[in-house]
Image (spheres, rainbow, N blue to C red):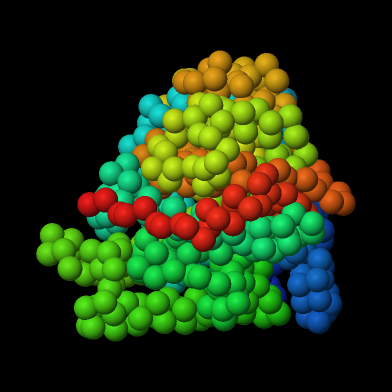
């Protein structure tokens, strides 16, 4: 993306270079050449040509000529040339909404890109193109098109574009596995992460799930004073997600929210999420904005990177000390260091670190928050889920069994419906084609950027008759229906099995332990209820909920007598 954007902008930038390096007469000559070249395509150039011819024939003062060219003609010409370049960059045969000069469709998608793309699909179909700045983007909005493109052309669509803000300013050399363009190095990283997150590995992490979800429920009970006080449960879910990420990757827990490291990671990763957004950073698509010396986002990105490097260094340093003392527990980083068959350089190891700490923190936390919101607003779903639990467990066992590998169908359906209705990454991380791709008679050239609008695909009316209704039963009726929340094809999220297992156990224990109510305003509409649609992750507005214990005495006894499940090997 960086190279493509910079290349598209080169012709327009030549005009600015001319002003700085040539005489007024030579500038007029070059401007005249540019205008006459493009005047067939742009009728407005005719009048500008006439003005230039007059200036060419009549002698105006040097100062007047310079002021006129710099203040009027050059900016106008820049826009004209840029529009020609933007038009020429579009892929023939693909419809799409018209854009504005210079910025294309960026203004139209500034509030909620995924929803706007979904609405446009009703006019332009499941696949169409938009212009973000000068860059043409193919937006995929239907289940059929997503499976056809990303499923059938998985290999050709295995790479990622690079964005200036995230890849060049924020992350520098090392990026997360999910945002790294395709390469031999990426294949090595994906192999390590896929092995660490597959089904057998997920079983090894059950003891961690067991402990963290027990602590999570205990915090809900204590924070809400046994269900008498409504409070924001989001920070408690953040601690759970972060602790699991640290345990799996570094072998340590985040046992409290009253911790400087907790605050630092949460703040920094929230900023990282903003910089990873494919629609929230206009300088990614308009290179001229990068020249702005007062652009605060650049300074903030560099500061975010410095702070992130700081706590990654602290975590790695702690790991090295524990390994030297022989007190280190099993984790991904220890495996990488000790396994002679794993050959990763420091950049690749850092990439995995970034992936593990950011991959589940925002996504799992956000999915839990949306599901809690639905349960609070929909007591009928709470009742159905609790009755389903009682068909397997007794009310005397509020913590149920951490080894339960998703054996309650209604609870599995509840989690899947939450992931469908409230797609966490509304726009999946974009893809770039590594070779020409032909679909439905249209050829997309190598280097084309594709956006998978998972939000629109999950709400596809050709798959569901009632996509805007939260109804877990749909997954019992159509268990093989597609779910696009984790992506499609080669770059599908490698941690989806771990995530599903984690979310299932969280919901199992929350519903088994508590009745949930809310206080104040709570909007569970997936569009209106999203706090900041410009961020990469679609988090709900913060809300206050009550977690009322179904049997407090029994629950506290279960906490007191809790013994973590022993890890399997």
Q: Residue furthest right?
A: 520
Work out whether residue 84 can be spotted: no
Position of residue 315 measured from the top left corner of the image (x, y, whole percent): 40, 77
The image shows residue 519, relative to residue 401, as above or below, that is below
Q: Residue at x 35, y 68 (%)?
A: 251
Q: Quadrant of residue 347?
A: bottom left
Q: Looking at the picture, tell me which residue is in the foreground, 137 or 126.
A: 126
Work out whether residue 231 can be spotted: yes
Q: Residue at x 71, y 79 (%)?
A: 294
The image shows residue 286, relative to residue 126, as above or below, that is below
Q: Across the whole image, how many numbered discs are drawn on residues? A: 0
Position of residue 425 measured from the top left corner of the image (x, y, whole percent): 58, 46
Q: Residue furthest left?
A: 340
Position of residue 492 measured from the top left corner of the image (x, y, whole percent): 42, 41
Position of residue 40 measured from the top left corner of the image (x, y, whole percent): 68, 41
The image shows residue 13, relative to residue 138, as above or below, that is below
Q: Residue at x 67, y 80 (%)?
A: 293
Q: Looking at the picture, tell me which residue is in the foreground, 550 or 150.
A: 550
Q: Looking at the picture, tell me which residue is in the foreground, 541 or 45.
A: 541
Q: Residue at x 31, y 51 (%)?
A: 204
């Amino acid at each position: 993306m960086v190279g493509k954007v910079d290349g598209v902008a080169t012709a327009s930038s030549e005009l600015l270079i001319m002003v700085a390096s040539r005489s007024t007469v030579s500038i007029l000559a070059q401007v005249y050449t540019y205008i006459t070249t493009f005047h067939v395509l742009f009728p407005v150039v005719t009048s500008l040509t006439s003005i230039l011819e007059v200036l060419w024939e009549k002698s105006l003062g040097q100062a007047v000529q310079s002021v006129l060219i710099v203040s009027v003609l050059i900016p106008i010409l820049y826009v004209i040339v840029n529009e020609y370049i933007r038009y020429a960059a579009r892929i023939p045969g693909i419809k799409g909404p018209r854009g504005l000069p210079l910025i294309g469709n960026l203004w139209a998608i500034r509030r909620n890109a995924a929803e706007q793309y979904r609405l446009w699909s009703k006019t332009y179909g499941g696949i169409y193109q938009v212009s973000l700045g000068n860059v043409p983007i193919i937006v995929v909005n239907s289940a059929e098109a997503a499976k056809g493109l990303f499923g059938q052309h998985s290999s050709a669509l295995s790479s990622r574009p690079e964005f200036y803000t995230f890849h060049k300013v924020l992350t520098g050399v090392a990026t997360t596995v999910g945002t790294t363009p395709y390469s031999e190095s990426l294949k090595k990283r994906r192999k390590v992460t896929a092995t660490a997150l597959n089904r057998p590995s997920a079983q090894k992490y059950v003891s961690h799930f067991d402990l963290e979800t027990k602590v999570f429920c205990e915090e809900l009970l204590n924070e809400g004073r046994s269900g008498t006080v409504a409070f924001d449960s989001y920070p408690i879910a953040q601690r759970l997600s972060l602790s699991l990420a640290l345990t799996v990757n570094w072998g340590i827990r985040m046992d409290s929210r009253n911790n400087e490291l907790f605050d630092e990671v949460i703040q920094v990763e929230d900023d990282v999420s903003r910089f990873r957004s494919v629609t929230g950073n206009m300088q990614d698509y308009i290179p001229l904005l990068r020249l702005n010396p007062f652009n605060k986002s650049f300074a903030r990105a560099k500061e975010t990177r410095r702070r992130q490097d700081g706590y990654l260094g602290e975590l790695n340093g702690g790991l090295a000390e524990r390994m030297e003392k022989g007190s280190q527990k099993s984790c991904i980083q220890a495996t990488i260091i000790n396994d002679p068959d794993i050959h990763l350089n420091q950049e690749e190891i850092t990439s995995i670190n970034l992936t593990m700490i950011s991959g589940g923190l925002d996504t799992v936390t956000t999915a839990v928050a949306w599901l809690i919101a639905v349960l609070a607003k929909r007591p009928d779903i709470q009742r159905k889920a609790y009755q389903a639990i009682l068909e397997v467990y007794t009310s005397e066992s509020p913590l149920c069994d951490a080894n339960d590998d998703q054996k309650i169908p209604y609870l599995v359906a509840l989690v899947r419906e939450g992931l469908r209705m409230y797609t966490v990454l509304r726009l999946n991380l974009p893809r770039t084609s590594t070779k020409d791709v032909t679909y439905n008679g249209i050829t997309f050239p190598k280097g084309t950027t594709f956006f998978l609008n998972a939000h629109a695909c999950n709400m596809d009316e050709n798959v569901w008759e009632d996509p805007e209704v939260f109804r877990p039963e749909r997954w019992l009726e159509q268990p093989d229906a597609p779910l696009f929340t984790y992506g499609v094809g080669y770059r599908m999220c490698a941690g989806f099995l771990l995530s599903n297992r984690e979310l299932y156990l969280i919901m199992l224990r929350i519903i088994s332990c508590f009745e949930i109510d809310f206080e104040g305003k709570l909007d569970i509409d997936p569009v209106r209820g999203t706090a900041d649609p410009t961020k990469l992750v679609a988090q709900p507005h913060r809300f206050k909920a009550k977690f009322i214990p179904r049997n407090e005495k029994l629950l506290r006894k279960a906490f007191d007598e809790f013994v973590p499940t022993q890890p399997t090997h």
